[in-house]
Image: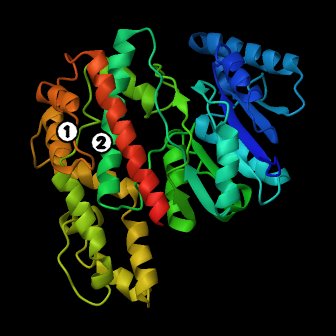
Amino acid sequence: MQNSLKLYLAVPVLNEYENLPELLDCILKQSYTNYEVVFCVNQYESWWDEDQYKRKCKDNGRSMEYLRDRKLDNVRIIDRSSKGNGWTRKHGGVGWARKVIMDDISDQASADDIIISMDADTYYPEDFLAKIAAFYQENPRGTGLSIPYYHKLCSEATNNRLILRYEIYMRYYAHNLIRIKNPYAFTALGSAIALSVETYRKIGGITPVKSGEDFYLLQKLVKTAKLATWVNTTTYPSARFSDRVLFGTGPALIKGNSGDWDSYPFYLADSFDKVGNTFGKFETLYTHDLKLPMDAFFNQQFGKEDFWLSLRHNYKDRKNFVKACQNKVDGLRILQFLRWDKDSTTSVNESTLTDYLLKHAVSKLPDSIKTILKKINFEKTSIEELNQLRDWMFEEESKLRKNNAETK
């Protein structure tokens, strides 16, 4: 493959010294070589004066030294870590790190160049960059990309049980959104996103929230550009405890380790169906007053019953009205609705998952998966069986996304 397309790899670094050698090894082994890596080693300035954070400050210093000592021509370092360069309390965190990197790339790259959002604790196969480059050589540069993921297991049984429970939850959520053909059927991981510089500029850059910047970036792409969710490669994030962000994999494992999975329930398939039915009626809603399954939620959220009527007044053609409705009922609103709708129901996570797979699985359930589902208990089922279920759901999701990509 020709290396004509320039790729920029955006990597935030905080307390990652032990992971950097493996990450650089992954990058240097890439078969595609027209790339530049931009690291942002970052932390809050106040950490230098707080004993509980001094270890992370020193770790960041070692990371800076390590990256500089490698003397690689295609590596740049943005220093938001050393004394005098750290974040203020108002502006900081991984969201700001990603923004600083991507803004820096946008300032000096060409519009057709590609930004790939990565993480320091993630493994990338040797053909990863080649597959991303091939995708953009075959698809419009205006298409953002949510890249498939698969969490690595480790030697710690407790960690593995927690990450498998969390990933099965994420795949269940994604399966349902794909099933109802929802435009927000993406899974947001900061280590698995790509978009062109032109598209980054078009959407106004990344929103530098302290947590969830990856989610809001993908949501922006759905609303103002285009988002693909399939490419023939996979990222492999680590399953580690982390409190660097307010939600996401690290905090989920911390909460899950204490037995608290309340933030990650298996919402009933019927609740997803209500979302699907609502989206399915937007076209008719342009000319007719309809009762929609999500009406009560929106009336409560916005305190008015003419929610859809106001959109109809503002958009004078059907296509733009439907798009406005989809933008209003975005990924965040869908999650809020699922949580709201769950309040009126009682369900057990394992039985909800089992019922869904028995009814909605695209492929015929293998006998081995049926056997696991008959007795599944996230606290007691063996890690080997949970991993087997996770692998099957991963393969099923890959089939769904690939089929959707091929039919568009």
| Element class at badge 2 | helix
- Residue 37, placed above or below residue 376: below
Residue type at the position of mark 2:
Tyr
Q: Residue at x 52, y 53 (%)?
A: 218
Q: Position of residue 202 (x, y in %)?
A: 67, 65
In the visual, does 38 lie left or right of 296? right
Residue 222 seen by the camera? yes
Q: Residue at x 70, y 42 (%)?
A: 130
Q: Position of residue 181 (x, y in %)?
A: 34, 62
* Quarter-of-image position of residue 140: bottom right
**Residue topped by disc 2:** 172
**What color scheme is it?**
rainbow
Q: Position of residue 385 (x, y in %)?
A: 26, 21
Question: Which callout, 1 or 2, points at the residue further toward the start of the chain?
Answer: 2
**Residue topped by disc 1:** 353
In the visual, does 184 lie left or right of 147? left
CA neighbours of label 1 inside 10 A, class few (<14), some (14 to 19), many (20+): some
| Element class at badge 1 | helix
- Residue 227, placed above or below residue 345: below
Residue 255 seen by the camera? no
Could you give the CA–CA distance between mark 1 and mark 2, rounded to whole angstroms? Answer: 7 Å
Q: Position of residue 401 (x, y in %)?
A: 43, 52
* Quarter-of-image position of residue 54: top right
- Residue 336, placed above or below residue 27: below
Residue type at the position of mark 1:
Leu
Q: Residue at x 45, y 19 (%)?
A: 241
167 vs 323, nearest the viewer: 167
Q: Are marks 1 and 2 in contact (CB under 8 Å)?
A: yes
304 vs 201, nearest the viewer: 201
Q: Residue at x 22, y 44 (%)?
A: 364
